[in-house]
Image (cartoon, rainbow, N blue to C red):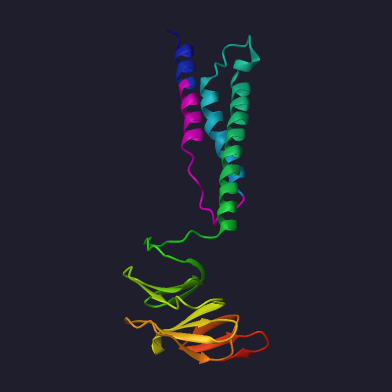
Amino acid sequence: MRVSSIRRVVGWRALLLAMAILVVAPQPVPAQEYKGKRKYIYSVLGFVVIAVPAYIAADDGDKSNFCESKACMSLIGGAVGALIGFVIGAELDSKYERKMAAGPSLDYTYRNVPLDITPEHIAYFPGGAAVSGVGGARVVYRDGSMLARGSSVRGIEDIAVLPGLDLLVLSTYSNLIAFPLRGDSAQGEVIDETGGGAMESFDDRLTVAGFDSLRL
């Protein structure tokens, strides 16, 4: 076999291998550093990765066909590689933009705690969370246990937890009703005869937004 034929076979194999590497296993560039620019970086990378094996594959001794010359093969191979690299880089840029638009991913531990109510409001406290909806409120602790509160309360507007006072507070149109946060007793007590539409707690102080006032 002639040396030129051997070089051509080796060159074509190198060309196919380079294309496979570029298409199948692209290495992403760090998103924060090259946001929106990876399409151009991959275009340059694709041109170099494909053009070099194409140059090796071409036999410059054969002048009968211009498209088998080193210059033509390198140009065509580089153009194909640049196009492939541009498409791959554009897809990576698009994925990054979609991820940033959706916000960072949450890292959480899943725990399945069945609720017998449809939750409409939720309040977090260090020991767990409380949810309320039609049918009252439920206090869910970190260990997965659950307590029912306010099952007879209707028209719950919002919910708040005051852990230092051991209170779960439900607001309705007409009043605020407090329940013990822990223990077996589910007895509630009206603590304010003025209702509220929204509540927020901080350091065991309660902010209540009523229909015509804001109370602390």
Nearer to us in this view, 190 or 100: 190
Residue at the farthest right position:
212
Q: In this view, does 75 lie to the left or right of 176?
A: right
Q: Does the magenta stretch include residue 31?
A: yes
Residue 11 picture location, percent across and down: 48, 21
Query: What number of labels is visible?
Result: 0
Above or below residue 84? Residue 159 is: below
Q: Does the magenta stretch include residue 20?
A: yes
Residue 119 picture location, percent across and down: 49, 67
Nearer to us in this view, 174 or 105: 174
Q: In this view, does 125 lie to the left or right of 49?
A: left
Q: Give the range drawn in magenta.
A: 13-36
Nearer to us in this view, 202 or 123: 123
Above or below residue 15? Residue 180 is: below
Residue 34 picture location, percent across and down: 57, 53
Residue shown at 51%/49% (left/top)? 29
Above or below residue 107? Residue 65 is: above
Above or below residue 122? Residue 209 is: below
Q: Classify the position of the C terminus by image quarter.
A: bottom right
Residue shown at 60%/22% (left/top)? 73
Residue shown at 63%/11% (left/top)? 65
Q: Classify the position of the N terminus by image quarter.
A: top left
Q: In this view, does 191 lie to the left or right of 140?
A: right
